[in-house]
Image: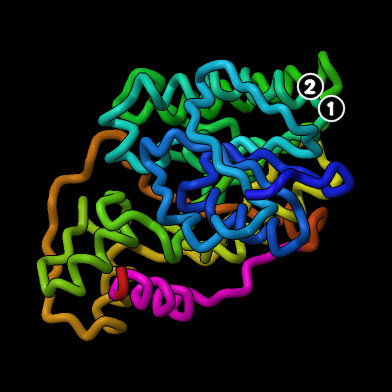
Amino acid sequence: MGVFDIKMKTVLVTGGAGFIGSHLCGFLLDKGYQIIAMDNLITGGIKNIEHLRSNNNLKFINHDVSKHIVVNEGLDFVMHFASPASPVDYQKIPIQTLKVGSLGTHNTLGLALAKKAKYVLASTSEVYGDPLVNPQPESYWGNVNPIGVRGCYDESKRFAEALTMAYHRIHNVDTKIVRIFNTYGPRMRKEDGRVVPNFINQALKNKPITIYGDGKQTRSFCYVSDLVEGIYKLMLSDLNETVNLGNPEEHSIFEFAEIIKGITKTKSKIVFKPLPVDDPHVRCPDIAKAKKLLKWKPKVELKEGIIKTIEWFKGN
């Protein structure tokens, strides 16, 4: 790893060794940015950025952003993408999840203020909870159980959004908030616990595909390259507000299981288990704002993206 060039723009990506963070690091390196990837590897993995490590424009720092952050380099952008994002993870480590959303957001905002950097917060569709409105526009305030098992994630992100807007209003930090809906693709962890890796792993092993609930609940699936392109457009925009990024094409979980079965040609049978507490019944983004203001919409069809994801799972 070489010495950074002060003439090049530098981006700090927290959670840089995570699923989305690693894709973001690779994308920004290709665009000519210098990247500091920061991660404590609690859910991320060095293997996600191994293919980038020979690039002199990448530095990796193993650090928990919930603790004080020291970055010697100048920064043009701070992108806060550090957080467990799977219910399996954040229900195992709820306190760390709350801390990265609160203390981690505070530390990264303070860094952006000190460095005069633009700030991008990775928020989530989980701020909408189990929504009573479908699809969910940015104007919807949500239906969240603050003391439920998912509250550690939902409320940490809602707090992170509030703190981000406070730094924008009080300290004039140039902040952007992306509400990320279900995203999938290569580098998802096999044991992630979310529907895409679960179904793919079960299908590839000819094990029963487990649907929680009756399978009528809906999700929308955005391929990671589409998401990263949307994040990049938001990062360069003049917007200082929340923007949904996701694929507005809605599928029932049962329908999605059938798609996985068809592509993998598995012998797996579909089995049903009880629905987890506070699991949302619908999840679909209204992306009218992203279409209008960022000129963004997803391009990768579900089957195309799933085939690419399955190929990656087969080789890893």
**280 is higher (above) or lower (below) than 149:** below
Residue lying at the far front in this picture: please name it.
2
Quadrant of the image occupied by residue 310? bottom left
Question: Is residue 7 rendered to the left or right of residue 182?
Answer: right
Number of residues whose C-alpha sits closer than 10 Å to that of mark 2, classed few (under 14), some (14–19) or many (20 or more): some
Residue at screen point 68% across, 27% down: 71
Visible residue check, residue 81: no
Cβ–Cβ under 8 Å for marks 2 and 1: yes
Question: Is residue 140 rendered to the left or right of residue 256?
Answer: right
What amino acid type is highlighted by mark number 1?
A: Lys
**The label number, if any, that marks residue 310 in the structure image:** none
Front-most of 290 and 99?
99
Q: Picture coordinates of residue 188 (x, y %)?
A: 38, 57
Q: Is residue 38 magenta?
A: no
Residue at screen point 71% across, 18% down: 110
Distance from disc 2 to disc 1, alpha carbons, whole Å, reads: 5 Å
Number of residues whose C-alpha sits closer than 10 Å to that of mark 1, classed few (under 14), some (14–19) or many (20 or more): some
Residue that carries the numbered disc 2 in the rendered image: 113
Visible residue check, residue 8: yes
| Start-end of magenta stretch | 296-314
**The label number, if any, that marks residue 116 in the structure image:** 1
Residue at screen point 30% across, 60% down: 197
What amino acid type is highlighted by mark number 2?
A: Leu
Q: Picture coordinates of residue 142 (x, y %)?
A: 52, 32
Question: Is residue 190 rendered to the left or right of residue 142?
Answer: left
Q: Picture coordinates of residue 164 (x, y %)?
A: 69, 24
